[in-house]
């Protein structure tokens, strides 16, 4: 075995398997910069909570590339003395090439989103990726159907997952499966009513493995809890963190603290601090809802 990722990073297999068995869900949180990453890792360590931090392909470009992200994450793990389980995950990888590049760069988990492909091509691609991922001890997430809405240029029509495809995908060796169950990326529109729990039940019966809920931001809490009870073991959050960061930063600026030259309120360390705290507060709130809070013990 040739493990490329940093010794402190772990793949997500045990995390999601334990969550599936224990009827809770691991929080997957997308990162966008140093402050985002540091806040999430500190919150996870302080609360003894396992965490999956992730980047979309758009975030990888924004943050400067794979070496920057892997170096930053590994540096923070070491310098902050992070001891809770942390996986670094590729979110919605659109090609095998991208997934393999992330693995080679040091990611400990990847998602290959082949939902835009013909299903047979999607299945063949996952099987090919598994050979590469297994050699590096990296966990893999696959997707069937598609998640509605748009995230960093990835657009899904919102098709419901097919139980037969779920059963086939579960045999490839993947650690977790994403499938459309009426969930949507981004803010939920007013007309949206509910996840399709009947679809989730059928999918879980077919695959009997950890499943992933994308578009977790904004789903009512009772629906989140029900989805977890039916086999959702990983919940992806991005928009909710962005909104909490925005609101805290807006409050700081509206109170004109950034204009306080004496206190140097314009210093980015002070300007971004309220947003970072809001991210930590949101992490605590959501991981308690998901049931993974404190589970690193």
Image (tube, helix red, strand yellow):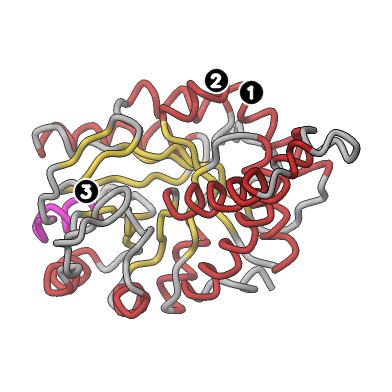
Question: Which residue is located at x 35 percent, y 55 percent?
Answer: 176
Question: Which residue is located at x 17 percent, y 73 percent?
Answer: 197
Q: Residues within 10 Å of mark 2 (few under 14, many from 20)?
A: some
Task: Answer whether residue 150 is magenta in the image.
Answer: no
Q: Is residue 157 left or right of residue 297?
A: left
Q: Tag on residue 147?
A: 3
Q: Report helix, strand or loop for mark 2.
A: loop
Residue 268 spot, x, y in % from top left? 75, 33
Q: Look at the image and give the residue range highlighted in magenta.
A: 161-169
Q: What secondary structure do most residues of the magenta stretch adopt?
A: helix
Q: Tag on residue 68?
A: 1
Quadrant of the rendered structure where residue 56 is? top left
* Closest to the observer, 143 or 279: 279
Question: Which residue is located at x 50 percent, y 42 percent?
Answer: 54
Viewport quadrant of the C terminus:
bottom right
Residue 157 spot, x, y in % from top left? 12, 43
């Amino acid at each position: 075995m040739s493990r490329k990722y940093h010794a402190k990073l772990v793949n997500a297999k045990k995390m999601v398997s334990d969550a599936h068995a224990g009827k809770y869900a691991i929080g997957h949180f997308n990162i966008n910069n140093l402050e985002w990453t540091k806040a999430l890792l500190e919150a996870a360590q302080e609360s003894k909570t396992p965490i999956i931090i992730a980047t979309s392909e758009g975030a990888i470009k924004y943050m400067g590339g794979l070496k920057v992200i892997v170096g930053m994450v590994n540096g923070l793990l070491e310098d902050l003395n992070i001891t809770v389980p942390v996986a670094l995950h590729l979110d919605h990888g659109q090609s095998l090439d991208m997934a393999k590049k992330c693995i080679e760069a040091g990611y400990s988990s990847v998602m290959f989103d082949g939902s835009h492909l013909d299903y047979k091509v999607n299945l063949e691609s996952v099987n090919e990726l598994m050979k590469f991922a297994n050699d590096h001890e990296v966990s893999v997430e696959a997707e069937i159907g598609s998640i509605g809405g748009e995230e960093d240029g990835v657009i899904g029509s919102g098709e419901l997952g097919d139980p037969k495809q779920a059963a086939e995908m579960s045999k490839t060796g993947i650690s977790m499966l994403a499938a459309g169950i009426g969930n949507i990326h981004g803010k939920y529109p007013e007309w949206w009513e509910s996840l399709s729990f009947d679809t989730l039940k059928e999918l879980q019966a077919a695959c009997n493995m950890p499943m992933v809920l994308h578009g977790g931001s904004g789903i009512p809490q009772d629906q989140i809890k029900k989805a977890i009870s039916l086999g959702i073991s990983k919940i992806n959050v991005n928009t909710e963190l962005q909104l909490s960061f925005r609101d805290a930063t807006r409050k700081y600026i509206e109170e004109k603290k950034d204009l306080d030259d004496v206190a140097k309120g314009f210093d980015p360390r002070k300007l971004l601090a309220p947003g970072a705290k809001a991210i930590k507060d949101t992490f605590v709130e959501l991981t308690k809802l998901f049931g993974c809070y404190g589970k690193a013990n």
